[in-house]
């Protein structure tokens, strides 16, 4: 289509328009001395238009212009920022050359005017800006990537070292990516294992914000705190109980030990079966909960625990449970020791489940040997009773557990009953609050022997005060009165061990062991 302006203009009209423009705008457009040159150019243009040699704008010209602009926008926003700098410059040069070539081809070959001059000028100005900005973004992204890689590695190191709070801080500084999400999940599992349930819940919630479909983070974000911990409010034990999940990777941990199940409860708190993952050794882990320790006494309890644990750890005797490790968590301290297959002698302290008398003598003699060894190391047990004597029936061996723990536990004035010790097995001087020596352990072992032989306690009462009065002042029934078939050595050994006055008992636990072995040989022919 021919430009309609070409049919309207002719030379007279063009000259008239030029004259008016020269009068009105000439001084602002060009200097007056160049007016003749401007008139010549305008006259030449008007003559060309009158002769039909002007450029035409096709009907589809505006659509083509819109399409070219859209291509230019895509070039600026999408294509140029993506590749490297050299590739982007090459693409920009090819694009500019293509636009310019297309314009020249349309003008020279088809006398068509495609209004893309503004677009070409805009590209010439904006492309360098886009390239510089894209390079800056790539440089910044590379720096952030290097920082995140360093933080991720540091978080992994802290996680392996058990420094979970620092690992969480480093991880949450990183930009989201699959590696960060996976390490964050491992962090949450360890927090859950370490019973840091509030921290684990926060980590799961953070992971759910990154990727709510990643594994089970959405479920865990709302359930881990309430489903993983249960509090036992027993007035005597007052300990926190772990709810052990079936999945191995979520099993709680105490220190480096993976907790498998609860074994029982004692004066210290809860006892767990654990595994040392480094050497695949099963251990019994006894805990001392801080829950019922008065705040002003807590530091003293901790110091005594670790001091006594250090002393106990130096004991090496076949009839003493070996202590491998001690550690501390925010709410408790713990001691990892031998796990003995079997049960305590508490099971055999009832009338319907008594052991043979000769077996009782042998086992109590082993306990006496262990006490004699400990007393020579200036360590008093203070809580000898059937529940602290672990019996390995297969090897006919007994091991004494909890050396030195009673001294730690009974230091807290907030505990009563069994937490103070076991009044039934405590010596008169211990109940009176007097100085406790090895003679007190001999008394407790005498009470234990009494119960293992008869299935009954020497004293009984509904109140601790009355029980303590009986232990201090009353004489108990003879073991042969309760079980007439016992040999004569039984009441003799029991009565001497349970004498009210410490100096009337055996001079040492070793002397008691010797008396038991002589009775074994005399009464049963066992040497």
Image: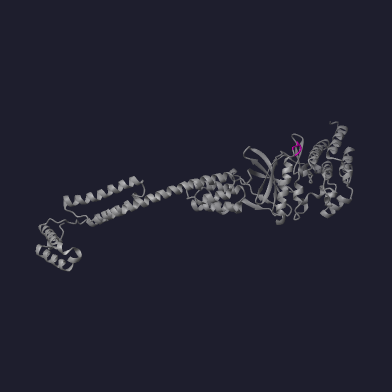
**From this viewpoint, is residue 160 visible?**
yes
Q: Position of residue 406 (x, y in %)?
A: 76, 48
Question: Which residue: 75% across, 50% down?
Answer: 409
Left or right of 326 in this view: 32: left
Left or right of 17 in this view: 336: right
The majority secondary structure of the magenta stretch comes to loop
| Picture quadrant where residue 479 is located | top right
Part of the protein shown in magenta: 316-320
Q: Position of residue 394 (x, y in %)?
A: 74, 34
Q: Position of residue 205 (x, y in %)?
A: 53, 53
Residue at the extreme front: 33
| Picture quadrant where residue 514 is located | top right
Q: Image quadrant for the N terminus?
A: bottom left
Question: Which residue: 81% across, 36% down?
Answer: 362
Left or right of 444 in this view: 241: left
Q: Position of residue 170 (x, y in %)?
A: 53, 49
Q: How is the image coloured?
A: one colour
- Where 400 sits versus 46, above or below? above
Q: Nearer the viewer, residue 151 or 519?
A: 151
Q: Is residue 318 magenta?
A: yes
Q: Nearer the viewer, residue 357 or 197?
A: 197
Report the number of numbered marks.
Answer: 0
Q: Image quadrant for the C terminus?
A: top right
Left or right of 212 in this view: 413: right
- Where 119 sits versus 351, above or below? below
**From this viewpoint, is residue 116 visible?**
no
Q: Is residue 205 magenta?
A: no
Q: Nearer the viewer, residue 475 or 176?
A: 176
């Amino acid at each position: 289509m021919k430009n309609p302006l070409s049919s309207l203009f002719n030379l007279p009209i063009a000259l008239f328009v030029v004259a008016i423009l020269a009068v009105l705008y000439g001084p602002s457009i060009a200097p007056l001395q160049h007016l003749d040159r401007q008139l010549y150019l305008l006259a030449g243009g008007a003559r060309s238009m009158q002769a039909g040699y002007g450029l035409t704008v096709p009907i589809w010209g505006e659509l083509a212009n819109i399409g070219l602009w859209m291509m230019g926008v895509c070039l600026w926003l999408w294509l140029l920022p993506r590749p490297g700098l050299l590739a982007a410059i090459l693409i920009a040069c090819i694009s500019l050359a293509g636009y310019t070539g297309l314009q020249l081809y349309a003008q020279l070959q088809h006398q068509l005017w495609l209004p893309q001059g503004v677009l070409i000028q805009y590209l010439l100005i904006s492309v360098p800006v886009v390239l510089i900005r894209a390079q800056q973004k790539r440089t910044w992204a590379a720096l952030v990537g290097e920082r995140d890689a360093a933080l991720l590695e540091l978080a992994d190191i802290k996680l392996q070292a058990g420094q979970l709070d620092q690992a969480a801080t480093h991880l949450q500084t990183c930009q989201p990516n699959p590696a960060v999400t996976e390490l964050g999940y491992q962090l949450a599992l360890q927090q859950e294992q370490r019973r840091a349930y509030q921290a684990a819940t926060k980590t799961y919630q953070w992971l759910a914000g990154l990727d709510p479909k990643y594994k089970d983070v959405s479920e865990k974000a709302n359930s881990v705190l309430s489903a993983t911990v249960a509090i036992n409010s027993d007035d005597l034990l007052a300990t926190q109980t772990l709810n052990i999940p079936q999945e191995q990777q979520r099993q709680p941990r105490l220190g480096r030990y993976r907790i498998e199940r609860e074994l029982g409860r004692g004066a210290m708190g809860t006892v767990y079966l654990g595994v040392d993952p480094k050497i695949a050794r099963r251990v019994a882990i006894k805990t001392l909960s801080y829950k019922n320790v008065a705040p002003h006494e807590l530091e003293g309890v901790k110091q005594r625990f670790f001091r006594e644990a250090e002393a106990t750890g130096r004991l090496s005797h076949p009839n003493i449970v070996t202590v491998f490790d001690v550690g501390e968590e925010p709410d408790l301290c713990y001691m990892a020791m031998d796990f003995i297959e079997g049960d305590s002698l508490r099971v055999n302290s009832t009338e319907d489940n008594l052991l043979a008398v000769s077996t009782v003598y042998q086992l109590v003699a082993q306990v006496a040997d262990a006490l004699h060894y400990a007393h020579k190391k200036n360590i008093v047990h203070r809580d000898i009773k059937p529940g602290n004597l672990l019996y390995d029936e297969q090897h006919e061996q007994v091991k004494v557990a909890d050396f030195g723990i009673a001294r730690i536990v009974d230091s807290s004035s907030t505990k009563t009953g069994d937490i103070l010790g076991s009044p039934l097995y405590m010596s008169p001087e211990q109940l009176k609050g007097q100085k406790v020596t090895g003679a007190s352990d001999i008394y407790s072992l005498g009470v234990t022997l009494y119960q293992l032989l008869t299935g009954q306690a020497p004293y009984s009462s509904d109140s601790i005060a009355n029980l303590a009065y009986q232990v201090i002042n009353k004489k108990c029934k003879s073991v042969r009165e309760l079980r007439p078939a016992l040999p004569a050595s039984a009441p003799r050994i029991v009565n001497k061990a349970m004498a009210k006055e410490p100096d009337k008992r055996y001079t040492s636990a070793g002397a008691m062991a010797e008396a038991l072995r002589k009775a074994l040989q005399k009464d049963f022919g066992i040497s």
